[in-house]
Image (cartoon, helix red, strand yellow):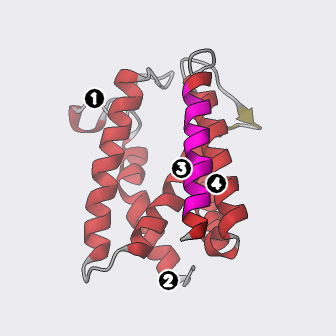
Amino acid sequence: MRKIKKFSSIAILLVLAAAFAALFIDIKTILIIFLTSLLFVGYVIYKEKIGQELLVAFLFAAFITSYYIYEYTTSNILLGRINLFPLISWTFSLVLLREIYERMRNKHKIILISLFYLFVLFILEYLGFYLAGIRLNSNFPSLFGSGIIHAPLPMQIFYLLAGPIYLLATDYLRVK
C-alpha cells in the first residue's frame, strides 16, 4: 500500500507538470517525457515487479515502430528511424494494460481486458486525433471509416490485436 501511495503522489505531480508544460510545448513531446517519467518511477518503486513486463512491452513497441515509420504533421523526435512518441506510448500502454490485467480477479479476464483494451484504444485514438491534433503525415484510411487508426490495414490489425497478444505472450512467458 505504501508503494501505491508513493507512486500515486509522484504521478499526480507529473500530471500537473505535464498539464502546465502542455501550454508551451508540443503535446507529443510532453507525452514522451510524462510517460517515460511514469515508467521510470514505476520501475524504481516496483523494480522486479514491472521489469520483465516493461522489457517485453518495449520489444513489442520497438518491433512495430521500427517496422512502420511514424511521421506526424507536427514535431517528430526520432531515434534513428524510430519515432519516440509511438515507441513510448505503446510501451507505457502495454505495461499499464498488464498491471490492470494482473489485478483482475475474474475467470474470463482475458476477454474482459481485451474489450477494455479496445474501448480505451478507440477513446485515446479519438482524443488524440480530434482533440490533441496528433495526426500522421499520410493519407491512409481510418479503421472502418470510423475516423480513428489512420494506417494501412496490417497496422490497423496490429492495433486491434497488440494488447491481447501482449497479454497472452506475457502469460506464456510467465512474466511477473
Residue 23 placement (x, y as % from top left): 57, 16
Question: Mostly what secondary structure, the magenta segment?
Answer: helix
Looking at the rendered image, the quarter that the C terminus falls into is bottom right
In this picture, residue 32 sits left or right of residue 122: right
Of the image marks 1 and 2, the number of the one nearer the N terminus: 1
Of the image marks 4 and 1, the number of the one nearer the N terminus: 4
Contact between marks 4 and 3 (CB within 8 A): the answer is no
Of the image marks 1 and 3, the number of the one nearer the N terminus: 3
In the rendered image, which quarter is residue 76 located in? Answer: top right
Name the mark nearer the viewer: 1 or 3. 3
Of the image marks 4 and 2, the number of the one nearer the N terminus: 4
Residue 125 placement (x, y as % from top left): 37, 36
The residue positioned 42% from the left and 66% from the top of the image is: 100
Q: Secondary structure at mark 1?
A: loop
User: Mark 1 and mark 3: span between their CA atoms?
Assistant: 20 Å
The residue positioned 40% from the left and 38% from the top of the image is: 152
For label 1, the residue is: 147
Q: Amino acid at mark 4?
A: Leu
The residue positioned 36% from the left and 30% from the top of the image is: 127
Q: Is residue 117 above or below residue 37?
A: below
For label 3, the residue is: 90
In the rendered image, which quarter is residue 147 located in? Answer: top left
Q: Amino acid at mark 2?
A: Tyr
Q: Amino acid at mark 3?
A: Trp
For label 2, the residue is: 172
Q: For the residue carrying disc 4, how many other residues have a C-alpha within 10 Å: few (<14), some (14-19), or many (20+)?
A: many
Q: Is residue 27 above or below residue 81?
A: above
User: Mark 4 and mark 1: span between their CA atoms?
Assistant: 30 Å
User: Mark 4 and mark 3: span between their CA atoms?
Assistant: 12 Å
Q: Which residues are magenta?
A: 5-19
Q: Amino acid at mark 1?
A: Gly
